[in-house]
Image: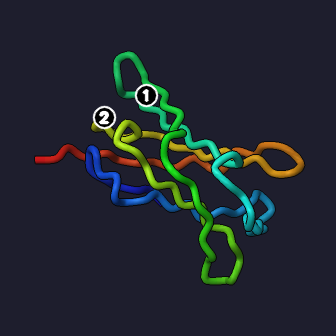
Amino acid sequence: MSMTTFQGDTGTPFRFPISLINGVRPNLSGFTNANFTLHLYNAQANPPVLKVCNGGTFSVQTDTDGTNSIVVYQPVAADIDTVGTWTVYLSIIFSNGPKTMNIDTITVNPIH
């Protein structure tokens, strides 16, 4: 599920439906900003750029199956200030340790 946004658009959150490798949709109720880290990597930049997004706000939403398994990230301007296609991955700290979710892409388009 790739996402598209515009440079500096802090009004559009990024949504990440979470499933573990075994297909289980974890209940993320009670998880806070401290449980999540979002990484953006742009290999096309010269030199390549890695951003760790930690200025925005993470929240958890209920999915259609009733599980609290959708992570929503409200970005800040510094997260999406550079046009390009970014590989994105979300790390979640569970009680048994951190897990990195499947990679995705976010395309940041220029504002005309």
Between disc 1 and disc 2, the foreground one is 2
Q: Amino acid at mark 1?
A: Ala
Q: Residue at x 37, y 36 (%)?
A: 78
- In this picture, residue 104 sits left or right of residue 30: left
> What residue does disc 2 label?
82
Q: Amino acid at mark 2?
A: Thr
Residue at the extreme bottom = 65
- In this picture, residue 97 sits left or right of residue 16: right
Residue 108 versus residue 31: which sits nearer the camera? 31
- In this picture, residue 83 sits left or right of residue 14: left
Q: From mark 1 to mark 2, how far is it between C-alphas? A: 13 Å
Q: Residue at x 43, y 59 (%)?
A: 13
Question: Is the residue 53 above or below the residue 15 in the image?
Answer: above
The image's mark for residue 43 is 1
Residue 11 image offset from top left, x and y in percent: 34, 59
Q: Residue at x 71, y 48 (%)?
A: 35
The image's mark for residue 93 is none
Tally of numbered discs: 2
